[in-house]
């Protein structure tokens, strides 16, 4: 089976970042490539212009141009937008072509730099621009002369302005696209956080019990902690609810015993007060016990060994008063010093519910037997009542389930007994009794010394 791979926030951020970088880099690379191509062509053209005298000399040497002067005279120098000047080392114009003179460039040498290795844009008076090409630099009679070809820069400046506009447009477009991608990236990258916030709101409104398990790895610890806290809170609420139900169930028996004592006219005032104070003390113990169970759970209660006989004697007095009309007899088949591996509160709660159940359904007899083995103690609580049907022998230990719908009750007592026995790693089950009623068997492991 394939293991489910949790998504990661860092993977989302990485993917979106790489996508944005790739987009912007590709766009800038395209623009830079185009600008480089244009620059390279301009540089190549300038080199070609600078080599024109060499080309003419090669043609003349090859005999293709036999009379250079005649060939030059055959050309129309006015049919060009290139103009030429010769400058000396003092930036004086020693010669200028007819077109240069016509363009009033007599002082152009003052604006030219000393070295012109590449085509250079120069500005004349009135912001008139020219592109200068250096064709040759010669020394004669101790003076240095420089032949420079000029061309109007109007078309170049217009093209450059268009390039600036186009560059600004594309850069703006790239920025907008990048911002759009960033917004999409943040929306996608932080979607799990929005989902987490929405599910937390649903949990706060009790619309869901826990968070999903498909969050990115970076949020897994947070979601697990929240789910763990939710389970603890849910379990605690359940414990409080069960504890209140159990407390009401247990107090109902004590209140019934108190009413029976008050109705017993045979008791002296002193004995009546003593019996009622005994019931009140047991009620107080029950309240403390159930509150402790609600806070720490059954597993958190301290385990110890407790004497069985005093608890059974106290419960027998109470239940004999409640079910006085039955005149049921409790038979104890165990010695007075028998100890069970339960703390006193658990022992009282367990046998209180078990004996109350037996007294309620018996006809006239209830019997308790205890058998001690090497590692277990087995307790049997039997009655001569109608017993439990085989198909109900497991269900009756579930909360809210009752085997006899005709008798009053909430189906809580036996479920409490099951919880207590289970917390001690014991077992409880029901079978048919030798008294022809129900026999509840409890196996409890001995506590380690």
Image (cartoon, helix red, strand yellow):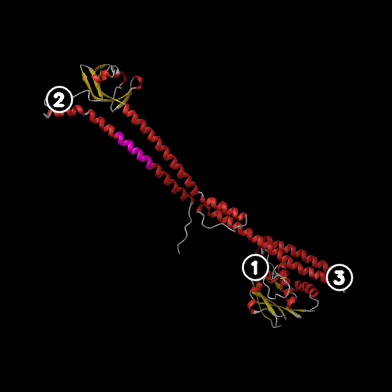
Q: Earlier in the sequence, mark 1 or mark 2?
A: 2
Residue that badge 1 annotates:
423
| CA gap, disc 3 and disc 1 | 38 Å
Give yes or no for contact between labels 3 and 1 (Cβ–Cβ under 8 Å). no
Residue that badge 3 annotates:
271
Residue lying at the far right in this picture: please name it.
Answer: 269
Residue that badge 2 annotates:
71
Between 331 and 360, the one nearer to me in the picture: 360
**In terms of image quadrants, where is residue 227?**
bottom right
| CA gap, disc 1 and disc 2 | 119 Å
Residue at 44% from the left image edge and 49% from the top image edge: 15
Q: Earlier in the sequence, mark 3 or mark 1?
A: 3
What element does badge 1 sit on? helix
- Callout 1 crowding tier (Cα within 10 Å): few <14, some 14–19, many ≥20: some
Circle nearer the viewer, 1 or 2: 2
Q: Position of residue 380 (x, y in %)?
A: 69, 77
Visible in this render: residue 205?
Answer: yes
What element does badge 3 sit on? helix
Q: Position of residue 50 (x, y in %)?
A: 23, 28
Residue 137, above or below 24: above
Residue 390, above or below 16: below
């Amino acid at each position: 089976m394939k293991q489910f791979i949790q998504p990661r926030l860092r993977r989302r951020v990485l993917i979106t970042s790489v996508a944005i970088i790739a987009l912007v880099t590709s766009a800038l690379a395209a623009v830079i490539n185009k600008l480089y191509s244009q620059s390279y062509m301009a540089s190549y053209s300038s080199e070609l212009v600078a080599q024109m005298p060499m080309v003419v000399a090669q043609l003349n040497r090859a005999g293709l141009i036999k009379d250079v002067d005649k060939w030059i005279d055959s050309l129309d120098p006015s049919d060009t937008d290139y103009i030429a000047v010769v400058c000396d080392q003092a930036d004086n114009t020693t010669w200028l072509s007819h077109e240069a003179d016509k363009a009033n460039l007599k002082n152009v040498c003052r604006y030219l730099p000393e070295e012109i290795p590449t085509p250079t844009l120069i500005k004349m008076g009135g912001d008139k621009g020219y592109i200068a090409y250096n064709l040759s630099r010669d020394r004669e009679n101790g003076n240095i002369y420089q032949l420079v070809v000029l061309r109007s820069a109007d078309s170049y400046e217009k093209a450059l302005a268009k390039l600036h506009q186009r560059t600004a447009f594309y850069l703006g477009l790239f920025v907008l696209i990048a911002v759009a991608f960033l917004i999409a990236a943040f929306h996608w990258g932080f979607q799990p956080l929005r989902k987490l916030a929405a599910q937390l709101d649903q949990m706060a409104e009790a619309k869901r019990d826990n968070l999903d398990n498909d969050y990115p790895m970076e949020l897994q610890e947070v979601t697990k902690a929240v789910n763990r806290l939710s389970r603890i809170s849910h379990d605690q609420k359940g414990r409080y609810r069960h504890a209140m139900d159990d407390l009401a169930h247990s107090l109902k028996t004590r209140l019934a015993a108190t009413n029976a004592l008050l109705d017993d006219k045979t008791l002296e005032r002193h004995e009546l007060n003593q019996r009622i104070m005994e019931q009140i003390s047991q009620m107080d113990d029950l309240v403390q016990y159930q509150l402790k169970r609600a806070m720490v759970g059954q597993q958190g209660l301290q385990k110890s060994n407790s004497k069985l006989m005093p608890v059974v004697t106290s419960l027998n007095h109470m239940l004999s008063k409640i079910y006085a009309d039955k005149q049921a007899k409790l038979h104890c088949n165990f010695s007075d010093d028998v100890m069970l591996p339960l703390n006193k509160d658990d022992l009282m709660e367990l046998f209180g519910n078990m004996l109350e159940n037996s007294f309620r359904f018996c006809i006239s007899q209830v019997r308790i037997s205890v058998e001690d083995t090497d590692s277990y103690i087995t307790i049997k609580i039997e009655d001569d009542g109608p017993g439990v049907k085989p198909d109900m022998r497991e269900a009756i230990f579930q909360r809210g389930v009752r085997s006899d719908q005709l008798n009053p009750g909430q189906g809580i007592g036996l479920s409490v007994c099951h919880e207590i026995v289970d917390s001690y790693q014991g077992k409880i089950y029901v079978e048919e009794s030798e008294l022809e009623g129900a026999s509840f068997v409890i196996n409890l492991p001995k506590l380690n010394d």
